[in-house]
Image (cartoon, rainbow, N blue to C red):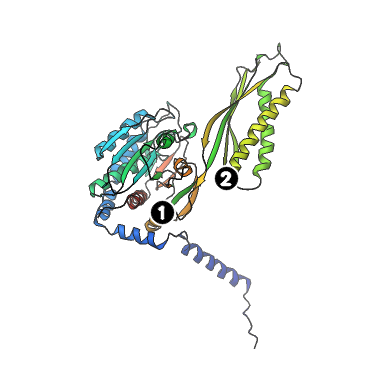
Amino acid sequence: MKLKMPVLRKPVFIMLLLSLLTHSALTGQNSLQAEKAYNKAVEKLNKKSQIKKAMEVIDQLEPETEETLITLTEIPAPPFKEQKRAEKFRSLLEEAGVDKAWIDEEGNVIALRKGSGEGKVVALDAHMDTVFPEGTDVTVRRKGDTLYAPGIGDDTRGLAMVLTILKAMNAAKIKTRADILFIGTVGEEGLGDLRGVRHIFKENKLKIDSWISIDGGSLGRVNNAALGSKRYKAVFKGKGGHSWGAFGLANPHHALGMAIAEFREQAAEYTSKGEKTSFNIGRIGGGTSVNAIPFESWMEVDMRSVSVEHLQQIDNIFKASMQKALTEYNNSGVKDKVSLELIPIGDRPSGEHPADVPLVQRAIAVSNFIGANTQLTRGSTNANIPISQGVPAVTIGRGGKGGGAHSLGEWWINENGAAAIKLALLLTVLEAGLTP
């Protein structure tokens, strides 16, 4: 006997489809799952009296956490000039209670909270520097429930979180097997090129086994992959002269223009296929007057890729494009020649931890336990360095709600911000191991 399937009219079919999609979206909110053993470990840890106490303390400290955020935000920390903020952050860590706190040769603030000596060394980090130049007004303004100031979120909020986690652990008398390093790093942004964390891992004198960075907004972010980048300052130089009297003399600006056109054409073709790779000319400068042939013309170039091989290839394309444009311009009939210097100004390594790495699994489990929409992500953060060296590392979000990062209008709202602090504390203790 042949069964007849019911025929759904179009409106009914659409409603059914929408219903199924909605159900899928809701039930799949935390579709990224950790292995059962890690989920059970989080549940077991959360039942401990010390952890319950720490969670209560985090809630109680919310006004204090906000005051810390405002205090640190209003201490300028422009690129390569983070010293004043570093000194304040060290003093706050010492007041909260650590075994030792110091500022290293590069300017990083490092505070040691000793474990039982049975475990490893776990680092919890947020970066102290901002993108804003010296002289920027960093006064925090409040409008309703919103805080406005350059750097209020990225990453001063992370620093405030690190401090509150330390206070909560001390108040709850949490003891860990591993030593924990509470760190404020320098040079994460822009031309800082991760100089703070590079210094820490250069010789790895601290023997760090796991690295947890707090950076980026979203609660539920588990950044386990490092987005690599290469950056250059390309400088074309010539003799320079009067725009009329020396007309025909080799002009660095003209050479730079040819170089940009050549690079854009070659790079656009390469990045149109394969793994995601990007290129950008972010700044251009040079010249003294509208009626003067410049003696120098420069540009700053940023290239990124999820792939080590693709990053190297776009780097090769950039260098070849610069040399080709230089040669063609100098052979175009101009008087004299221009020269080219390529100055490396950034080199962030790529890398990725598989999802089954224990630290990544713990981060997923804790994030889901907190109720976040957990996602594995790729980014350019302090974690790039340990990831590239095979040291387990993740970057997690600072929570709350914010926007306008890297702008003068940056803002942040404490919308369930305590959840991000609790997530970071649980992950840190889970990784460090709670003593019996």
In the rendered structure, find residue 358 and report the number of the disc placed on it.
Answer: 1
Residue 435, percent from left and from top: 26, 53
Seen at 35% across and 45% down, the residue is 122
The N terminus: image quadrant? bottom right
Amino acid type of the residue that numbered disc 2 sits on in the rendered structure: Ser
Amino acid at pointer 1: Pro
Q: Return the residue nearer the eye: 147 or 225.
A: 225
Q: CA distance from mark 2 to mark 1?
A: 23 Å
Q: Is residue 277 above or below residue 186?
A: below
Residue at x 63%, y 84% (from the top left corner): 3
Give the residue pinned by disc 2.
Answer: 307
**Place of residue 416 in the rendered image (x, y in percent of width and height, measured from the top left):** 36, 51
> Quadrant of residue 293 in the image?
top right
Residue 143 visible, this angle: no
> Mark number for residue 7?
none
Mark 2 or mark 1, earlier in chain: 2
Residue extending furthest toward the top: 245
Which residue of the protein is positioned furthest toward the bottom in this rendering?
1
Residue nearer the viewer, 341 or 192: 341
* Residue 293 in the figure: left or right of residue 158: right
Disc 1, SS: helix
The quadrant of the picture occupied by the C terminus is bottom left
Asked which quadrant contains residue 326, the reply is top right
Front position in the image: 140 or 379: 379
Is residue 338 in view? Answer: yes
Q: Are marks 2 and 1 in contact (CB under 8 Å)?
A: no
Indicate the position of residue 132 as horizontal and vertical percent values: 45, 31
Q: Residues within 10 Å of mark 2 (few under 14, many from 20)?
A: many
Label 2 secondary element: loop
At 24% from the left and 37% from the top, the residue drawn is 95
